[in-house]
């Protein structure tokens, strides 16, 4: 595979999670609005419903799950920087490569396959909230779990490719890194 083809392939996959992340960011605004409506109904109007708290945790789940690949893309995930900050670019690439290969991809694989029966059962049963007034389509939110594993795994593969590129050629700076 040529160096240019490699970069094009990596950049396209990288941008995929960028677009997902940009779209999922809007759920934060939606969640704020839902919380405001919930608080208004609950405390000012003395009306309560299971709908709003469930919608809040659904939106939070979507942000957390579907935004994980976006967070990885922008290096906003949890990392202990005490040692990492002192490493050279190639050393960081090696550490990231090992971390992605030994920890991230196996985690994504386990998450996907462990969630499959859980999600399948929810779809077969057309699972919905047991609470009166709750959300009727709980099975849909559960499908975000394997989707998150796929998105995070894809971004992990992109990050692995970037690490290999840095190890082989010295540095990687994506032309569209801020897309």
Image (tube, rainbow, N blue to C red):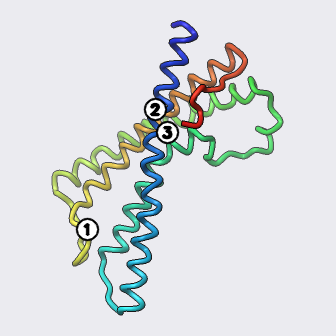
Please report whichever mark, 2 or 1, sits nearer to the chain's N-terminal start: 1
Q: Which residue is mark 1?
A: 135
Would you place residue 111 above or below residue 61 in this image?
A: above
Is residue 65 or residue 120 the one in the foreground?
Answer: 65
Residue, x 32% and y 85% (percent of image)?
48
Is residue 5 or residue 159 the one in the foreground?
Answer: 5
Residue, x 42% and y 41% (percent of image)?
149
Q: Marks 2 and 1, how far apart in space? A: 30 Å
Secondary structure under the numbered disc 2 in the rendered image: helix
Whether residues under marks 2 and 1 lie with C-beta atoms below 8 angstroms apart, the answer is: no
Please report whichever mark, 2 or 3, sits nearer to the chain's N-terminal start: 3
Is residue 137 or residue 22 the one in the foreground?
Answer: 22
Q: Which residue is mark 3?
A: 18
Residue 56 position by quadrant: bottom left
Q: Position of residue 53 (x, y in %)?
A: 37, 73
Please report whichever mark, 1 or 3, sits nearer to the chain's N-terminal start: 3
Other residues around mark 3 within 10 Å, as few (<14) / some (14–19) / many (≥20): many
Q: Position of residue 25 (x, y in %)?
A: 47, 53
Q: Marks 1 and 3, how far apart in space? A: 29 Å
* Left-right relation of 175 to 21: right
Q: Which residue is mark 2?
A: 154
Residue, x 69% and y 25% (percent of image)?
94
């Amino acid at each position: 595979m040529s160096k240019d083809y490699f970069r094009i392939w990596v950049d396209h996959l990288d941008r995929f999670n960028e677009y997902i992340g940009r779209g999922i960011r809007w759920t934060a605004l939606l969640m704020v609005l839902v919380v405001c409506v919930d608080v208004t109904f609950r405390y000012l109007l003395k009306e309560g419903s299971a709908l709003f708290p469930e919608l809040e945790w659904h939106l939070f789940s979507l942000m957390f799950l579907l935004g994980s690949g976006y967070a990885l893309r922008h290096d906003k995930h949890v990392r202990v920087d005490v040692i990492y900050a002192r490493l050279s670019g190639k050393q960081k690439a090696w550490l990231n490569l090992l971390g992605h290969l030994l920890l991230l991809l196996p985690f994504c694989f386990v998450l996907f396959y462990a969630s499959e029966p859980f999600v399948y059962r929810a779809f077969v049963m057309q699972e919905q909230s047991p609470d009166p007034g709750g959300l009727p389509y709980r099975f849909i939110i559960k499908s975000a779990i394997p989707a998150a594993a796929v998105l995070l795994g894809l971004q992990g593969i992109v990050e692995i490719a970037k690490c290999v590129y840095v190890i082989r050629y010295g540095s990687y700076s994506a032309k569209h890194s801020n897309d």
